[in-house]
Image (cartoon, rainbow, N blue to C red):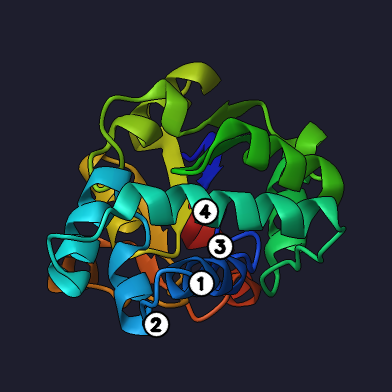
Amino acid sequence: MINAVIFDMDGLLFDTEIIYFECYRKAAAEWGLDFTFELFAACIGISREEAERFMKQHFGQDVDPAKIHHRTYELVEEYLQKGGPIPFRPGAKEAVKFFYDKGLKIGLASSNMRKWAEFYLRQSGLFDYFSAITTCEEVKNLKPDPEVYLKTAHKLQVPAEKCLAFDDSAAGATAAIAAGMRTCMVPQISKPTRLIREQAFKIYNSLQDIYPDMDELLA
């Protein structure tokens, strides 16, 4: 029986990926570079080091991806400070509340920074639903490594095999599968790999679609 539900954040709970893409695009343009959506999609859900490797392959070895990252973070901060909207993904708020009301422990396993994770959760009114939050600062290896999911399960004091995980990225779903969790992928930008199609418990178009399978998901 499932005792805890662990959510990814960006692209699953909040529709922030398009915000990040626009900020990356604007940052790269300041150096005369075209940050394509295809490049952005390749960088979703992976470590900063891996993303920078992709960026060097795309732009050339003379480009310093760290500068683009730094400028992007500044632009995201500006967006948030100006009160830019942080929209929910379809069904996200309702899903968190649903599992919480059923008495399950709720965790967050994000590759983002803690300050942004806490900001998004507080702004959205979801912060108090989460018993554990794990972000990139707390792990050595980011998704697709399972560390962030395993650490969240440890904080919740629930064995990994008794956790239900939801993630929108291929890297994140792979991480949750590797952690031994009952894994559901809800793709937004990245597509499920063959491994995910074979080993994920379910693949949904939206968190709105999970309820007909609830007995099976929580069994």
Q: Residue 200: x percent and y percent?
A: 28, 62
Numbered tag placed on residue 71 in the rendering: 4
On the picture, is 104 further left or further right than 50? right
Residue 40 location (% of width, % of height): 37, 72
* Mark 2–mark 3 distance (CA, rounded to whole Å): 18 Å
Number of numbered discs overlaid on the protein picture:
4
* Marked residue nearer the N-terminal end (2 or 1): 1
Report crowding for label 1: few under 14, some 14 to 19, many 20 or more residues within 10 A (C-alpha): many
Q: Nearer the viewer, mark 3 or mark 1?
A: 1
Q: Which residue is mark 3?
A: 12
Q: Percent position (x, y) of residue 47?
A: 30, 46
Instruction: Classify mark 2: residues with Cα within 10 Å, few (<14), some (14-19) or many (20+).
Output: some
The vertical placement of 60 against 137, above or below, is below
Q: Which mark is residue 21?
A: 1
Tag on residue 37? 2
Label 2 vs 3, first from the N-terminus: 3
Report whether residue 214 is seen: yes
Front-most of residues 51 and 112: 51
Q: Residue at x 53, y 34 (%)?
A: 3
The type of residue carrying mark 3 is Leu
Q: How far is the residue under mark 1 from the one under mark 4?
A: 13 Å
> For the residues marked 3 and 1, what is the alpha-carbon distance in whole angstroms?
16 Å
Q: Are marks 2 and 4 in contact (CB under 8 Å)?
A: no
- Residue 189 occupies quadrant: bottom left
Question: In front here: 185 or 199?
Answer: 185
Which residue occupies the foreground of this view, 128 or 118?
A: 118
Q: In the visual, does 10 lie left or right of 182?
A: right
Say the numbered circle drawn on residue 65. none
